[in-house]
Amino acid sequence: MFYFLGIDIAGSNNTWVVALGFSKDENTLIPVEALSLKNFSFPEPLLELEEVVKFSLKNRVIGAGIDAPLSFSLIEDKKGFRTADKFLKSILPPRAKNWVVSYNALMAVPLRGLLLARKLSPFCGTIIETHPRASFYFCLPEQYKFLAFKYKKSSLLHEEKILIINIFKKFGIKKFKENLLVEGIIDAIFCALAVYFFHRAPEKLLFLPDTPSAEGYGPFVIIKSF
């Protein structure tokens, strides 16, 4: 089986990683009982990024979508906002613009993302940067876009979780349990889906612009629609 990783990098006690296995026979994505889903009843964050590297050494990882800044243009990005960040802010609604944060403000997250990308690169086919919350917002039907504002602040209702699971089904994830829908897992799933579509359906992605002098890993993409 081939795997696509979704990595929601935050603090050392709040990083979530999901592996989606691709079944060619069924043409579907299967959440794997590993990493943050070691226990399908109680998903947990990873304490060590080394677990992601170990998984990639043992399995055929086609790509990894990482929620952390992975490219920089140090001369031009004086305030830590890249061209891609400014573009993403411009297409989000006004009250969502604070979802895009300067890499200066993120402090340790960009460094952890870069270190992980470097460690993964010999064993992982593709490494991209993504923004799962923005992807979640753009994939929601208009009347449910409020969920992209709600899911990080309060618990989701049963019917709201079913809606998200149905979105996952449309994207090819056929087996997903309601109890797994915590904030970190939702973000990690959208990270994994971004790199899956990078290979299988790039027309579903919006490629965010970067400066010619940018260095690092990428590109920076979000899922723009069904």
Image (cartoon, grey):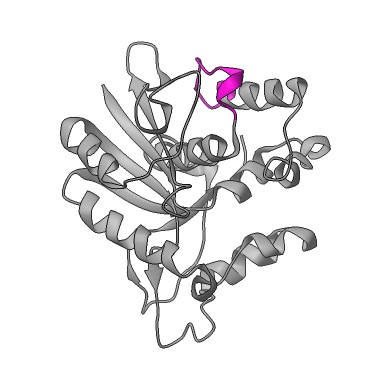
Residue drawn at point x = 59 percent, y = 33 percent: 182
Considering every residue shown, the one lying at the far right of the view is: 143
12 part of magenta stretch: no
Foreground pick, 196 / 12: 12
Residue 36, percent from left and from top: 41, 33
Q: Position of residue 205 (x, y in %)?
A: 52, 46
Q: How many numbered discs sit on the rendered protein?
A: 0
Percent x, y of residue 217: 33, 61
Q: Between residues 149 and 208, which one lies in front from this camera angle?
A: 149
Q: Is residue 119 above or below residue 171?
A: below
Viewer can see residue 93: no
The answer to whether residue 172 is magenta is: yes
The magenta segment is 169-181
Place residue 56 in its image quadrant.
top left
Q: Which residue is at 46% across, 33% downward?
A: 44
Horizontal side of residue 124 vs 172, given as left or right:
left
The outermost residue toward the top is: 25
Residue positioned 63% across, 27% down in the render: 167
Quadrant (top left, top right, bottom left, bottom right) of the N terminus: top left
**Visible in this render: residue 130?**
yes
Residue name at image x 53 percent, y 67 percent? 84
Q: Quadrant of the C terminus?
A: top right
